Amino acid sequence: MRRLSLSSRLALLFAACTAVVSLFAGVLFSRASEAHFVELDQQLLDGKLIGLRRALHDIQSSESEVKLADELSRQADLSLRITGSDGKRWYDSSTRLPQELPTQAGLSTVSSEGTDYRVLNAPLYLDKPDSPQLTLLLDITHHQHFLQRMQHLIWLTVGLSALATALLGAWAARSGLRPLRRMSAVACGVSAQSLNARLPEKNMPPELAEMAHNFNAMLGRLDDSFQRLSAFSADIAHELRTPLSNLLTHTQVTLTRPRPIEDYREALHSNLEELQWMAQLVNDMLYLAKADHGLLMPKREPLELAEEADLLLEFFAPLAEDAQVKLSREGSARMEGDRSMLRRALSNLLDNALRFTPVEGEVRVRIVDQPEGLNVIVENSGDGIDGALLPRLFDRFYRADPARQEGSSEHAGLGLAITQSIIRAHGGQIHCESDNGWTRFVIELPRT
Amino acid sequence: MKLLIVEDQPKTGHYLRQGLTEAGFNTELVADGSAGQQLALSGDYALLILDVMLPGRDGWQILQAVRSAGLDTPVLFLTARDAVEDRVHGLELGADDYLVKPFAFSELLARVRSLLRRGNATPQETTLQLADLRLDLIRRRVERSGQRIDLTAKEFALLEMLLRRQGEVLPKSLIASQVWDMNFDSDTNVIEVAIRRLRLKIDDEFPNKLIHTVRGMGYVLEERPA
C-alpha cells in the first residue's frame, strides 16, 4: 500500500477533527433544544390540566360542558381524552385522535398518522384511587419539523466544515512543509563538487532549525574530510612527482653519451636514494590507508610503559647526545597494546621532538597514570609552535618547515599522521599544545 | 648451498637471482607454481623464496605441500600485499619470514643469511676478531691494536653484530631490529649517528678503517686494502 503523503495525512486529520467537533456541538445543540421544547410543553400541559380539572369538577352541569369546550377552544392544538377507571373511553375532543395511547402517568411523545403529539396522562381526581384518567394531547408536529430541519442543517455543517478544513489543512500543511522540500532540494543538489551547499538556518521554523543545523554540520564534516582527501591525493602526486622527475632527468642525462664508470655508479646511487625515499613514502601511505579502513588491528600485549619509554630513549640516545639534548623519563604505567605499533608512534614523536629541540635543550617523556586513563606526554623545550598551526600538525604531508631540502633524508611529513592513526587504533587521542617554551604532545589512552 | 626462487614477475625474478648469485649463492628461478612445488619437494634446497601470487599453485599451497612432506626447509615469503591476515596466515602455515614489496635488496640478503644461519648453530665463541680489532664476549671488552676501547652497552652490541656478520652489508632496519629491538619502518637517522659514534671510537685513530658505509644499502665491517 502506498503511504499517504504528510500533507494529505495532516489535511485528513484536520477534517476529521473538525467533523467530530462540529458533530458534537450539533448533537448537543439539538438535544438542548429538544429538551427545551419538552419543558415548554410540560409547562403548557400542566397549566391546562389545572384548568381542565377545574372545568370537569362537576361534569353533570351543562355549564361545565361549556366551560370545558371553552377551555379546549382556547388552545387549538390541544385535544383531550377522558378514560374511565375501567379503561373505557368516555370522551374524545376530536375524532382524529390516535386509538392507542400510552397509559402510564406523566409526559410522553407519540407519533400517529403524520402527526406528533405530546401526551400527558393524569388522574381527574387527585384524591380518588379509581379516578377517571385525563389524557391531554398537544400537537407538536411543527416542533418536530423544526428539529428535523435543524438536524439536516447540522449534518450539512459537519460535511461542509470537514471539507473546508481538509482543503485549508492541505494548503496549510503544504506551505508549512515548504522548508522540508527546500531541504530535500539542497540534498538533491549535493555532490562531491558542491559540498559547500548549505541550508539557510535563519528562515527555518524552530522544529526544523535543529535538523537543518545538523544537516549543515554533516555537510561541513563531509566537506572537510573530502577536502583533506583531495588534498592528500594531490599531495601524493606532488610528493611522488619530485623524485620521479629527478629519476627521469638524471637517468636520461646519464644515458645521453658514454661516460666513465664512476658516473654511472654515481647515477645509480643517486637513483637509489630517490627510490628508497619513494618506497618509504608508499609504505607509509599504505599504512595510513590501512588505518583509514580500520585494518590497523593492534595486538593486546601487556606493556610496561616505563620500560618501553626507556628502550626508546636508549635508541634515541646517540641522536640526543649528538644534538646535546637531555633525554629523561618520569612516571610509569601498565597497559595493554601493540608493542611495535606504540614504539613506532612514540619513536615518531621523539624523533620529531629531537628535531625541534635546540642545543642544550631537553626532551622529556612523562607517563601519567590516572584513574580515568593513561597519559603519555612527549615534550621538548624550544621555541614552540604557533597556536594556529597546532591542529594542522597531524595532517598528512604537513610540514612546519616548508619544502623538503634536495637530497636530504627529510621526512615526507607522514610521521605524526601515522602516530595519530596508531593512537586512534588503540582507542586514544593525541593533541599538541605549546606554551612557555615547551611543545607538548599529549597522548590520552583509555584504561584497558 | 642452493636457493630456490619461485617468482612469476620476470624482472623481479631476474634481479633477485642475479643479486643472490653475485652474493655467492647457487640460485635457481622458476616462474610457475606447480614447477616450483616439484622442485621444492626434491629437498635439494637450503632455502625457498616464494612469491604469494603465482600461476599454477600459489605460495601458500607450495608451503603446505613442503611442510606436509616433512621438509623443514626455511621459507621466506615475498608479497605485494601487507594484509594482517596474510601475515598471520603465512606464519601459521609455517613460513619463516616475510617481506613486503617494495623491499630493499640488502634487507632480503640479510634475512636470507639469517635464515640460513639459523639451522647450523655456530659454536660458542668467546672472542670475535677482525684484523687488529678484538671483542671479548666474556669480559665484555674491546681492544684495537692492544689498546682498550670503552663502549656503551649498545655500542658493544652493535659492534658484536657487525663482527658476527663481517663482510655482510647490514641495512639500517636490520641493525635497529637486532640491536635495539625496534621492528618498525622508521626514517630516523639514529642508526647513522650510532654508527658514526662507533666509528669515532673504533676507526678514527687508526689508519685502516673497518666500518664502511655502502651507500644506499647499509653498513659493512670488513678489512679493505688501503
Image (cartoon, coloured by chain):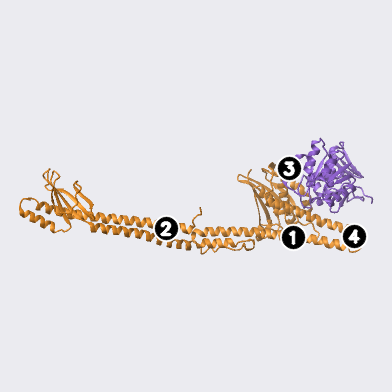
Chain colours: A orange, B purple
Give the residue type that dot 1 points to: Ala
CA–CA distance in space, label 1 to label 3: 32 Å
Foreground disc of the pair 4, 3: 3
**Disc 2: CA contacts within 10 A as few (<14), some (14-19) or many (>=20):** many
Q: Is residue A399 above or below residue A330?
A: below
Q: Same chain for labels 1 and 2? Say yes or no.
A: yes
Which residue extends farthest right?
B225
Q: Secondary structure at mark 4?
A: helix
Residue at image mark 2? A14
Relative side of A159 to B54, left or right: left
Q: Position of residue A438 (x, y in %)?
A: 68, 55
Q: Which residue is under mark 1?
A: A237
Q: Which mark is residue B88?
A: 3
Residue under pointer 4: A263
Tag 3: residue type?
A: Val
Going by the numbered disc 4, the residue's amino acid type is: Asp
How far separated are the C-alphas under marks 4 and 3?
45 Å
At horizontal 87% and vertical 59% (from top left) the residue drawn is A267
Q: Nearer the viewer, mark 3 or mark 2?
A: 2
Q: Nearer the viewer, mark 1 or mark 2?
A: 2
Subunit of mark 3? B
Mark 1 or 2 closer to N-term?
2
What whole-number distance in Å separates the C-alpha atoms at marks 2 and 4? Answer: 91 Å
